[in-house]
Amino acid sequence: MLADAGLGSRREMERWIAGGRVTVNDSAAHLGQRVQPEDRISVDGKPLRQRSRGKRKPSSDARVLLYNKPVGEVCTRRDPEGRRTIFEHLPELGSGRWISIGRLDIATSGLLLLTTDGALANRMMHPSTGLDREYAVRVDGRLSDEQCQSLLAGIEDDGELLAFSDIQYYDGRGRNHWYHVVLMEGRNREIRRLFESCGLMVSRLKRVRFGPVVLPSRLARGRFETLSEADTKSLYAQLKLPVPHFRNDRRKSEEDRRGAKKSSVLIPYPEIDG
């Protein structure tokens, strides 16, 4: 319910509840607690607006952004170390908030998706959905065929089994060689740890695809664009979520209008289980 109200992803809302930021009828909420329409719900002491509650319906305000994240930015809303955050560059919203669909660490660049819809964020991030992620990786050397096979079969590191679901050589010369690799989830430093297991250090790491969404070459580093209406509807349909309705009004931003004219950023993708 909190995620559907646009306050954040379901995982983030779970952290809020565990941290004591949510109350129900003036008592601290707990994970898995059921609520009724007449319950008084507050977040950080502020009552949740009644119109934000209720059963999930197709959204008329669903928005999805593609952001080409540069190296040096973090994916938190506020950083205690004063580093730049991705949220400093995003368009302001009249209501709700931008939710990051997954994260990239400070040294990783590339495709980052953000949305106003917590249900969409949860669906794309949840492991059961099975969306893979593709990265372009520059390393200081070249893998042998045997090493490629070992990275596909998986290695054990600090008690975790790490593996690529695909790895393809792309290009290179001298000590710098590029690979495209695919992960199903993406544990902490997983790509770097996999290459380090073969004695190679990663010097650049860029996400170029998240599930069916690819980073378009037209999107410069540090820039964002709104996913077009057609692509948004198609993405919801692929994920088996209620397809949002769009209002044709004058409040639609110039960015939305430009995005509607651009080529699709979705690729053919295997059917996703409901």
Image (cartoon, grey):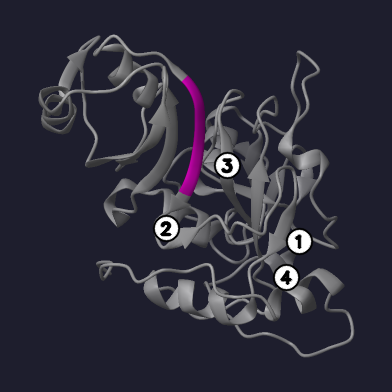
Q: Residue at x 62, y 37 (%)?
A: 27
Spatial distance from mark 2 to mark 4, Cα to Cα?
Answer: 23 Å
Spatial distance from mark 4 to mark 1, Cα to Cα?
Answer: 5 Å
Give the residues in magenta.
Answer: 203-208
The mark that comes first in sequence, 2 or 1, is 1
Q: Position of residue 180 (x, y in %)?
A: 36, 40
| Mark 2 touches mark 1? (CB < 8 Å) | no
| Kind of residue at disc 3 | Gly
| Kind of residue at disc 4 | Arg
212 or 232, nearer to the observer: 212
Q: Which mark is residue 110?
A: 3
Q: Residue at x 64, y 70 (%)?
A: 62
| Mark 2 touches mark 4? (CB < 8 Å) | no
Q: Is residue 218 above or below residue 126?
A: below
Task: Identify residue for label 1.
Answer: 49
Q: Which mark is residue 51?
A: 4
Badge 2 crowding class, 10 Å Cα cut-off, few under 14, some 14 to 19, many 20 or more, is many
